[in-house]
Image (spheres, grey):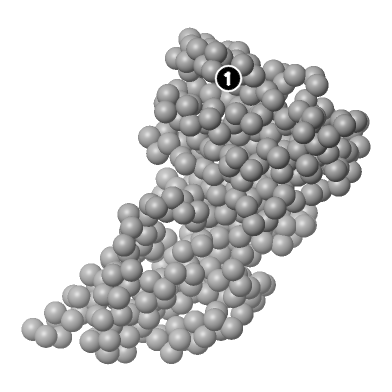
């Protein structure tokens, strides 16, 4: 037992390979509050090893080793990195080189560990993405703080921490909900091409791993393979009913996926509508279902149903922080886009043009432009313009 919270020893551990020097510098600066900083460079002769080694003069608590992880798996790499953790650590946290911790993290963590030394898990707010001004976009609770003993990583990608049955820790605690402790600033130059193959391996090794199937279906959609995405989402839905889950968002989010992937395949718009309506019935709090259904209806001559869907959304949806839901669906331009299309189908072309222009005017950052392209806003704007030009010819 430590005499004071200030005596709690914190260890940060990470894996690294091919990381830019500026990312390493930023990461180390933000991790400096730890008693130990452990880094495993996962490729022999990778330049990161030499660079980290030089940084030991500046960061005396830095422990660096290198080991070639072949074939590549994230769980194997992270488990190997855990072997570097000093035995007198009281609490450990895994972070990535493209993430930073805020300065208040260290004292807040030490206090909660001092008060609950036998904790099972400690959760903290994490910003997965940011807008062009550095403001958090997608924020949710994160879970990479554990005891130093008994824990290991499972799954080749989107890996998860598990604890051995031999250890009996007790209690799950949240850090200050008003602070976003960890922030992610991705290196967009990095490829994720290995993810799909690793997720296939994960599904083969763990056929009843529900969240793994969710990731696999989503990954297929990232490469525009909507048929396999749809088939995988069907399998996931079936397994949720067979196995059950305590994740009350997994089934409605799976139904939304079924709607999304159906809408991408010619002739399956009726299926998409069915899945979106089913998701709404299952969980009326999720805004995404309403937005997607209303957008689908807005592309058809069904404007009255669009307005009805949006009215229901305003009265029942609630903001939910979860990585599977889109926070930008709470921005006004997403509604303007839908209403503009509905007005166009009503023949109210002046209104449609003004509302769509209002949506475009709100896209004042590159980040919002990316979201708008993803939602097909400019395709809808082009369609309205063509209708107007045809009427005015």
Q: Which is more toward the observer, 33 or 53? A: 33
Residue 76 visible in the picture: no
Residue 86 is situated, as x and y percent measured from the top left of the image, at 75, 19
Q: Residue furthest left?
A: 393
Q: Is residue 357 above or below residue 116?
A: below
Q: Residues within 10 Å of mark 1 (few under 14, many from 20)?
A: some
Q: Residue at x 51, y 62 (%)?
A: 327
Q: How many marks?
A: 1
Residue 100 is situated, as x and y percent measured from the top left of the image, at 54, 38
Q: Residue at x 20, y 79 (%)?
A: 387
Query: Quarter holding the N terminus?
Result: top right
Residue 283 is situated, as x and y percent measured from the top left of the image, at 66, 72
Q: Is residue 365 above or below residue 202?
A: below
**Could you say whether the residue bearing mark 1 is in a helix, strand or loop?**
loop
Residue 376 visible in the picture: yes
Residue 58 is situated, as x and y percent measured from the top left of the image, at 54, 18
Q: Is residue 137 above or below residue 51?
A: below
Q: Residue at x 80, y 21 (%)?
A: 88
In this picture, residue 246 sits left or right of residue 225: right
Q: Which is more toward the observer, 367 or 61? A: 61
Query: Quarter holding the C terminus?
Result: bottom left
Q: Residue at x 30, y 76 (%)?
A: 358
Residue 257 falls in which quadrant of the image? bottom right
Residue that mark 1 sits on: 59
In this picture, residue 291 sits left or right of residue 200: left
Q: Which is more toward the observer, 393 or 329? A: 329
Q: Which is more toward the observer, 283 or 90? A: 90
Q: Is residue 17 above or below residue 373?
A: above
């Amino acid at each position: 037992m430590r005499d004071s919270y200030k005596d709690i020893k914190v260890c940060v551990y990470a894996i690294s390979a091919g990381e830019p020097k500026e990312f390493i510098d930023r990461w180390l600066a933000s991790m400096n509050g730890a008693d130990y900083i452990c880094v495993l460079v996962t490729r022999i002769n990778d330049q990161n090893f030499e660079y980290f080694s030089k940084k030991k003069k500046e960061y005396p608590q830095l422990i660096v080793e290198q080991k070639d992880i072949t074939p590549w798996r994230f769980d194997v790499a992270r488990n190997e990195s855990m072997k570097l953790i000093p035995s007198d650590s009281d609490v450990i946290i895994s972070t990535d080189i493209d993430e930073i911790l805020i300065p208040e993290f260290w004292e807040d963590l030490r206090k909660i560990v001092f008060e609950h030394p036998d904790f099972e898990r400690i959760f903290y707010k994490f910003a997965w993405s940011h807008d062009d001004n550095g403001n958090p976009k997608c924020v949710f609770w994160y879970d990479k703080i554990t005891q130093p003993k008994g824990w290991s990583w499972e799954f080749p990608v989107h890996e998860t921490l598990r604890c051995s049955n031999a250890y009996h820790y007790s209690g799950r605690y949240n850090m200050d909900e008003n602070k976003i402790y960890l922030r992610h600033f991705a290196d967009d130059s990095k490829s994720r091409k290995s993810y799909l193959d690793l997720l296939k391996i994960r599904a083969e090794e763990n056929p009843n791993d529900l969240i793994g199937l969710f990731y696999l279906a989503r990954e297929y959609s990232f490469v525009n393979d909507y048929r396999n995405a749809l088939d995988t989402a069907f399998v996931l839905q079936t397994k949720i009913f067979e196995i059950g889950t305590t994740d009350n968002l997994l089934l409605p989010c799976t139904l939304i996926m079924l709607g999304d992937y159906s809408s991408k395949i010619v002739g399956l718009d009726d299926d998409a509508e069915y899945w979106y309506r089913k998701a709404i019935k299952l969980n009326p709090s999720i805004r995404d279902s309403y937005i997607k259904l209303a957008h689908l209806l807005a592309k058809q001559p069904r404007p009255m149903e669009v307005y009805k869907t949006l009215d229901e959304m305003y009265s029942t949806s609630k903001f939910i922080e979860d990585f599977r839901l889109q926070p930008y669906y709470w921005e006004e331009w997403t509604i303007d886009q839908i209403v503009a299309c509905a007005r166009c189908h009503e023949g109210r072309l002046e209104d449609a043009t003004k509302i769509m222009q209002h949506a475009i005017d709100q896209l004042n950052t590159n980040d919002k432009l990316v979201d708008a392209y993803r939602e097909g806003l400019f395709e809808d704007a082009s369609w309205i313009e063509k209708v107007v030009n045809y009427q005015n010819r």
